[in-house]
């Protein structure tokens, strides 16, 4: 019988396989490669909570498995299909999956 960690890893893999928008790379704040060919979920028109309630923002949410990238930093870059997304903030990190609010940069 598989342990809880194995079951969780299998669940994460199944979720990403069905929801991913593609595979991309993550680079640190200095542009150095950290992880390649990681599965990424892209959420445009990200809803964020503010002082006046929930609002649509121009940020792009990027979700990936934490094990694939380790810790990410503000100003790091995700690259998917030659489009670069700069990390503005980490908005969710449960230890298995993480979501970053990013801005598309030229």
Image (cartoon, rainbow, N blue to C red):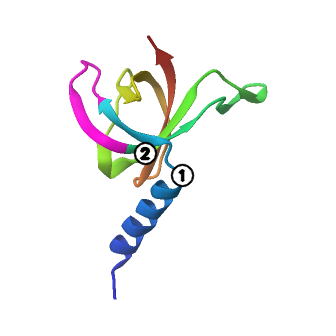
- The residue at 38%/29% (across/down) is 78
Of 63 and 22, nearer the camera is 22
> Whole-percent x and y of residue 95?
40, 53
> Whole-percent x and y of residue 1?
34, 89
Q: As displayed, is residue 58 above or below residue 53?
A: above
Dot 1 corresponds to which residue? 19
> Whole-percent x and y of residue 8?
41, 68
- The residue at 73%/25% (across/down) is 51
Instruction: Tell me the magenta residue range.
Output: 27-38
Q: As displayed, is residue 81 above or below residue 22?
A: above
Query: Where, quadrant-wise, is the C terminus in this rendering?
Result: top left
Dot 2 corresponds to which residue? 64
Q: Reading the chain from its start, which is encountered first: label 2 or label 1?
A: 1
Is 52 left or right of 19, judged from the image as shown?
right
Q: Secondary structure at mark 2?
A: strand
Q: Secondary structure at mark 1?
A: helix
Is 65 left or right of 100, judged from the image as shown?
left
Is 17 left or right of 54, judged from the image as shown?
left
């Amino acid at each position: 019988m598989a342990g809880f960690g194995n079951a969780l890893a299998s669940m994460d893999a199944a979720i990403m396989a069905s929801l991913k928008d593609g595979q991309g790379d993550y680079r640190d704040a200095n542009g150095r490669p950290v992880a390649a060919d990681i599965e990424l979920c892209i959420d445009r028109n990200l809803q964020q909570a503010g002082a006046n309630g929930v609002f649509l923002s121009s940020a792009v949410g990027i979700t990936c498995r934490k094990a694939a990238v380790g810790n990410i930093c503000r100003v790091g870059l995700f690259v998917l299909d030659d489009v670069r997304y700069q990390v503005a903030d980490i908005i969710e990190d449960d230890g298995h999956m993480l979501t970053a609010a990013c801005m598309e940069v030229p």
